[in-house]
Amino acid sequence: MAAKDKIDVNIFKTITRTILQSDDMESLGNRLTNILVSQLDIKGATIFALNPETEELEILASFGLSINFINKGPVTATKSGRWASERKPVVVSDITKSDGFQYPDHIKKEGIAAIVSIPIIFHGKIIGLLRLYHYEIWNISEQDIDTLNAIAEGLAMAMLYSRILNALLSVKNTVNDVHSIWLKPQKR
């Protein structure tokens, strides 16, 4: 039996608008993970940024997961699934039939039955990961995987935009500081 699509055009439009209307990664991530969990009726969602120096996935935003699960320890790209080496989505429809996870006891204790990992790629380089957690076995449709890939591409652009915006604001603030300190008119 074919898997039923969960992401319809209205959900996709809501997600796309959320990505396009945000200039802050934290608020974008919080809204996006909330939308994904509520609209797909899943356990949780997390957006990770990949730290290229440590190869750890750093949480940008998460919704639906317990604090204990979120704080379980560092998630490394090399130990956290095939998505990093294959550069493509990895679907584990039934956790009980997989042994490729870094924290299997935490996954079981959290009540997670399925995980979908979508790499966030920009210009061929993995910069993050969108991970969805389901409380039941999940036979996700190919259409939903394709849609999640498109969402991850939008996230990649948003992450880059946010970094550029933050860098520009930092430069602006530095220039303003220099101007006010060093180029302040002298009182006579």
Image (cartoon, rainbow, N blue to C red):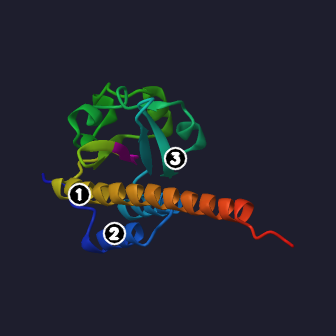
| Residue 66 picture quarter | top right
With 44 as the anchor, is 147 left or right in this view? Answer: left
Q: Secondary structure at mark 2?
A: helix
Q: Could you tell me how far apart the alpha carbons at marks 3 and 1 are, in whole angstroms?
A: 22 Å
Q: Is residue 6 magenta?
A: no
Image mark count: 3
In the rendered image, the vertical position of residue 3 relative to residue 129, given as above or below: below
Q: What percent of the width, then of the height, locates residue 114?
A: 34, 42
Which is nearer the N-term, disc 3 or disc 1?
Answer: 3
Mark 3 surroundings: few (<14), some (14-19) or many (≥20) residues within 10 A: some
Asked if the residue at tag 2 contacts the one at tag 1, i.e. Cβ–Cβ closer than 8 Å, the answer is no
Of labels 1 and 2, the one closer to you = 2
Discs 3/2, front: 2
Q: Front-most of 70 and 22?
A: 22
Mark 3, residue position: 65
On the image, numbered disc 2 is attached to which residue? 16
Q: Main secondary structure of the magenta part?
A: strand
Residue at image coords 71%, 60%: 182
